[in-house]
Amino acid sequence: MANGVQAVPDARATTELVPVITPGHSFVSVTEKISKIVLRKDTPIGWFLLFALTLGVSGLLATSLGYLVFMGIGIWGNNQPVGWAFDITNFVWWIGIGHAGTLISAILLLFRQQWRTSINRFAEAMTLAAVACAGLFPLFHTGRPWLAYWLLPYPNTMGMWPNFKSPLVWDVFAVSTYLTVSALFWYTGLIPDLATMRDNAKSRIGRRVYGLLAMGWRNSAYHWQHYEVAYLLLAGLSTPLVVSVHSVVSLDFAVSVLPGWHTTVFPPYFVAGAIYSGFAMVLTLMIPIRAAYGLQDFITMRHIENMAKVMLATGLIVGYGYSLEAFMAWYSGNRYETFMMWNRMTGPYWWSYALLILCNVVTPAFLWSKKVRTSVGALFVISIVVNIGMWLERFVIVVTSLHRDFVPSSWGRFSPTIWDFSTYIGTLGFFLMLLLLFVRFLPMISIFEMRTLLPSAKVDEAHGHGH
Amino acid sequence: MATHMTQSSQPAVHGLIAEFDNPNALVAATAKAHRDGYRKMDAYSPYPIEELRHALGAPASRLPVIVFIGGLIGAAAGFSLESWANAVAYPLNVAGKPYISWPMFIPVTFETTVLFASLSAVVGMLALNRLPQPYHPVFNHARFSAASTDRFFLCIEARDPKFDLKRTRAFMDTLGALEVAAVEG
């Protein structure tokens, strides 16, 4: 026993030592390395090419939405009985992706996970872009987006108020709160770095704009004191918030009586799925960016492997959710539940369920291998497969449950139109365009938090206690 | 602000600033200045240093109280909006449930609690830090921009009752700083 306890830390010591920041960096090198990406004059040509591409795809989104407003939502394929289809699938998918940012920033901060520091800023920006894309779908699914403010409680001449017992109203509050708090968290985290940008900017416009955004931050000990308290409190508030958002989204389904939706496993299984897809998207984006900007010193294999481990863990929870759904459908003895599950596996959309299991349960099993977890190429592929799998999961839940419910006379089929695809692809372009702008104009890694990780940042206890 | 008015007869000096190249020297110098009786001073560092607050003798931040009150207001606002809207303004019978079915009102109450508390945290932090602040004299020091990269500064301000240009400068020369300079007010 004693030997075993002894042996474990020794064996792990070699792997645990992969640092969160490559040794040899100083305050100056960390600051320059990260701020140079933004403050350089020569924007890489690749950035312009990608920006032009994503701008074009965003144009496709604008066209699709413009045509939808002009014609009505009949241009989409959803119709009775499948009233929710690509739009809600995409909404849930994007919101789920948006969960990684706050999870990395808030929950890992509370757990004092130092490795969060290199990736939290980028993941938060990804959250904001993803939630912006998510919001478009319910907004335009209303058909008259200019009347979307009817969802909000406000005194009106109709004398009507929202039904607060409806999960759809909870959703409005959950998603708008999540967007607001994520934006606050992100901006608060940026303030000291904006001051760094102000102080390092060469151009007059740069100094002005970053100076304005930094609001006069001067790195004072009094500033830092209130700042740290505010940041910690925001982390504490965001932690239950991030869990609540996807739980509320899952209640949109679970509160209804439809077989396939009416299940208590939904909230935890949705939250795990959200984290799973969020980490997959962070990996999909971080792996090329890390290579393109030469950030291997700050985003080390430790970060990459840890993200893979989180994916493996949440993937297992998601897999457990799938098996529990199938088990409960059988164990309940309810003929509608049993039929729903059988139809999901063998009905007209069997391929989506089969692909879902392949993408979300089989593929992440490769992550048990350390060789795979430390191979950037393999992880890039797996992360994309998981993104596809998580999209399929929402498609399976939304479409296969709706298309055949209790009464065979009301059964139907859903097939997407070209506008369903163009809107979805459009949001992908819009999402990437927002991230390209972020990477170009704001520091994508938290500079001041990276400084705290340097050995030279430590204050000796002997000097620390002056009185 | 009143102290500024009474000292307007003094020469236009914001204070004396000492520059250091490592956090230990700054913390030690700040603690020494505090022991020497200086109170109106501020320390600047490129990242948060817990020990600096103790060395400055700064009281604990009042922000948690502000956030707690913000959260309570959010909870009360959310729950009373729901109850009033669904029971008074537009009584809505859903499946024969009571107008005020409190468990159904918890999700929105939770969201408004978090929203108000988070807004209080950010607005409260900015207010306690007196931000946004377009001008501050410490920026007049030419080297000050290094405070956001790799340098550490201690500024003893002229509004400190113990401040005397010559004597304070002599004191600051003993702190082992790279440079001591006057900051224009």
Image (spheres, coloured by chain):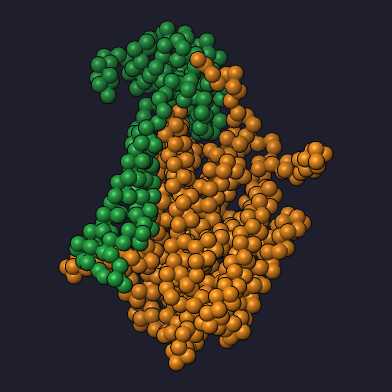
Chain colours: A orange, B green
The quadrant in which the C terminus of chain B is found is top left
Q: Which quarter of the picture shows residue A454? A: top right
Q: On the rendered structure, is B176 left or right of A257?
A: right
Q: Which quarter of the picture shows residue A331? A: bottom right
Which percent across, then down, holds residue B135? Answer: 35, 32
Determine whether A230 is above or below A434 in the image: above
Determine whether B34 is above or below A316 in the image: above
Please count the marks in the image: 0
Determine whether A263 is above or below B61 in the image: below
- Farthest residue toward the left? A157
Q: Is residue A195 visible?
A: no
Q: Is residue A226 visible?
A: yes
Which percent across, then down, holds residue A376? Answer: 70, 57
Determine whether A36 is above or below A53 in the image: above
Which percent across, then down, holds residue A155? Answer: 20, 62
Which percent across, then down, holds residue A113? Answer: 60, 43
Q: Which quarter of the picture shows residue A47? A: bottom right
